Image: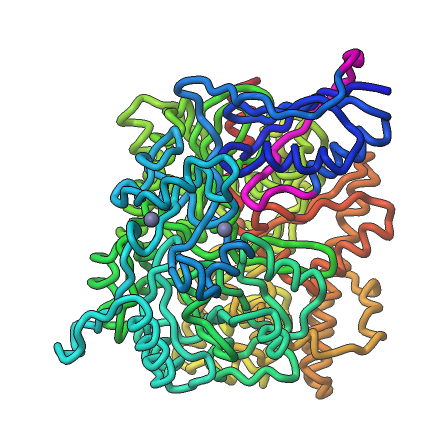
Amino acid sequence: MLRRSCVIRGVVQGVGFRPHVARVAQTYAVSGFCGNDDESVFIEAQGESEEVAAFLAAVRSQLPPLATIISYEEVDLDPVVGDDAFRIVASQHTPGARTLIPPDVACCADCLAELHDPANRRYRYPFITCTNCGPRLSIIRDLPYDRPATTMVDFPMCAACRAEYENPADRRYHAQPISCFDCGPLLWLERGVGAGDDDDLLLWDDAIERAHELLDEGAILAVKGIGGFHLLCDASNEPAVARLRERKHRPDKPLAVMVSSLEAARGLAVLSPHQEQELLSPQRPIVLCPQGAGYALADSVAPGLADIGLMLPYAPLHELLITGDRAVVATSGNRAGEPLCFTNADALEALSDIADAFLMHDRGIHVPVEDSVLLADGDDTLPIRRSRGFAPLPVIIGSENVHLLAVGGEVKNTFAITRDGMAFLSAHIGDMGSLASQRAFERSVEQMMTMHRTAPDLVVADRHPGYATTGWAQRYCERTGTDLLQVQHHHAHALSLIAEHGRTGEEVLVAAYDGTGYGDDGTIWGGELLMIGADPLAFERVGHLPAFSMPGGESAVRNPWKLAVALLAEHGIDDAGLPPVHAAPQAELRLVRSQLSSGTAVVRTTSAGRTFDAIASLLGVRQHVTYEAQASMELERAARGCTHVEHGRAEAVTGLPELIASLVAGQRRGQKIGCLARLAHLGIAALTSRDLSHMATARGISTVGLTGGVFQNRLFTRAVREALLGNGLTVLTHQRVPANDGGLCLGQALAGYAHLTR
Ligand code: ZN
Ligand code: ZN
Ligand code: FE
């Protein structure tokens, strides 16, 4: 017989946590109590030790959908004589306390059943929600989280809704966003500007029915969802998808597809149990899945790729809209390079040239939240974009209460603030190239600081002088007198990995491979081996991929043939007759050659991403790209097409120049592109794992880490990891924040935390 006390910190308020604990307690022979305060649930459980342990394990493993555990602590107490029942005790709320804000999650099974039940008063009600589901972060204006502090303040509850809201036994008890046809937001469809006025506004089911017809006709719809607008069109209608691409100025970058059910997803892709689980999770992310035999979507949905980004409906409105075997492109409702539209006025203006009609409602979105994207490979989950369903859940980085703002990078931007030992990561903001994105960034920063009632004592930014976020941080610090800390790009990548694994204070050897980062020597880094010390601020560049000179400017990134010509020249390999030389316009080729030989207008780079791009060009896979990593992704696809075991013997590779030379030789012999692409992946993986293993041994390090966008390449990552594991090393990879620049702010936050607490 024992009594155990535990404290669970996390999102535990307003998510049905105490009834959940009481329900679980009924199935175990335990007595005691549970209660909650603003940021934790406390439980005391008494009984036989196995019963108590099983009960506490069940409490944590079968969580209510919106609850999230950030930390868990337990301690044993003396049993209380005569305690023979389990009860809920009153909540303890501190005035002005800062509860954790839950993320937005998908419509729950109970609400779905009601949505499709003709006898229910919310039958086909597009805004159905309860304690266990619906919008949260996206509608919260301020804390404490209560209806008046949300955009639902505009919709006073009717008597029926209020009765549910006030009844502790009801599923809608204290669920802030609940409403119904009588008291909630309105759904309507309106045509775009050019459509003339033959269509009146259509409401409710009439709007949805017309939206179905429009999709069938190949029209493009702007649809207001949970965190912003989507652009939707029929994914099997090639002219419709092509039109969407043309209007959105997005020629090739893959588009996500929403399907009605898991069944429908199985028809398009080969799904692993893990992928199915992620598709169905309450976060409802876009999951990148291998295209299956039944894949028959328009060619322009994911041109040149072997994967398809799938997601299931998450808003009740999607449930009504995406039905049967409908597969619909669902891409962010924004103009190229601009942030997501989330107000009706914005959407009507910014999307007027893109959408033929708008399916909208008048529930306000306060915080724009884009869809999350992840890879589910084997048992691993690798976030590509951490946004809806995850933001703004914190990552614990320490125990000190320091206040800082980490502004993140330039592309795939997210930022973070810290308090109480936690780093709160924003939803995806996007690329900072446009003024509109920079304004969206600034607005989101202000919003988050207001919400957490904090002002930073330190601002952390990248060292790149040209990043908009760095410039913003410098101006902010000058204006407010706040200290600024600039952290090298790949150092921040490495710290982000260390932070998410809670390995702060340990020595870790990290490979940080990505496209571009400003190096401490003024060159472009991106194939770095970094030794992170027990002091996270101390790092040493212990190795890197061989550097090469690339023609400066954006044009080399958009034209991998320039990278290939440069890489071959660097290593003295003859490029005559190879694909990059064929693809190059002759005048431009002459210019590139003269730049390389004179050393003018070139930059030195060790970038792994650019090295892969160059190889993609070399092998004739791609010479021009329209989105970042396009060439490398297509190279990976080609490599996955080869299954010859003998190419696995890449250990024989002695160095990158030798590898490039053997790729060229193989090509001249007429070897298959897929085989050479695979050899390139395995070769660079072998070089990387060999160097990491040697250095780890030499320094007595047992833990190595893999970070940076290049480690989103599954084939490459798997090869590096397997080799390292084979050498007896512990390998850290990303599971909670993206390996790409979307995770950078967490590493910056850890650097800032170390700076302020040292
Ligand atoms: Zn629900
Ligand atoms: Zn109502
Ligand atoms: Fe990066």
Is residue 541 located in the magenta-colored stretch of the structure?
no
Asked which colour scheme the image uses, the reply is: rainbow
Corner quadrant of residue 139: top left
Corner quadrant of residue 250: bottom left
In x, y percent, where is residue 726? 86, 52
For image coordinates 72% across by 64% down, the residue present is 273
User: Is residue 273 depicted above or below 147 in this figure?
Assistant: below
- Give the quarter of the figure containing the N terminus: top right
Horizontal side of residue 85 vs 333, given as left or right: right
In x, y percent, where is residue 50? 86, 31
Q: Nearer the viewer, residue 493 or 175?
A: 175
Observer able to see residue 606: no
In x, y percent, where is residue 290? 64, 72
Observer able to see residue 663: yes
For image coordinates 49% across by 21% down, the residue present is 402
Horizontal side of residue 94 vs 341, given as left or right: right
For image coordinates 79% across by 36% down, the residue present is 701
In x, y percent, where is residue 111? 49, 55
Task: Identify the residue at the far left of this view.
Answer: 197
Q: Give the mark count.
A: 0
User: Is residue 614 depicted above or below 692 in this figure?
Assistant: below
Q: Nearer the viewer, residue 269 or 698?
A: 269
For image coordinates 73% across by 86% down, the residue present is 669
Q: Which residues are magenta?
A: 62-82
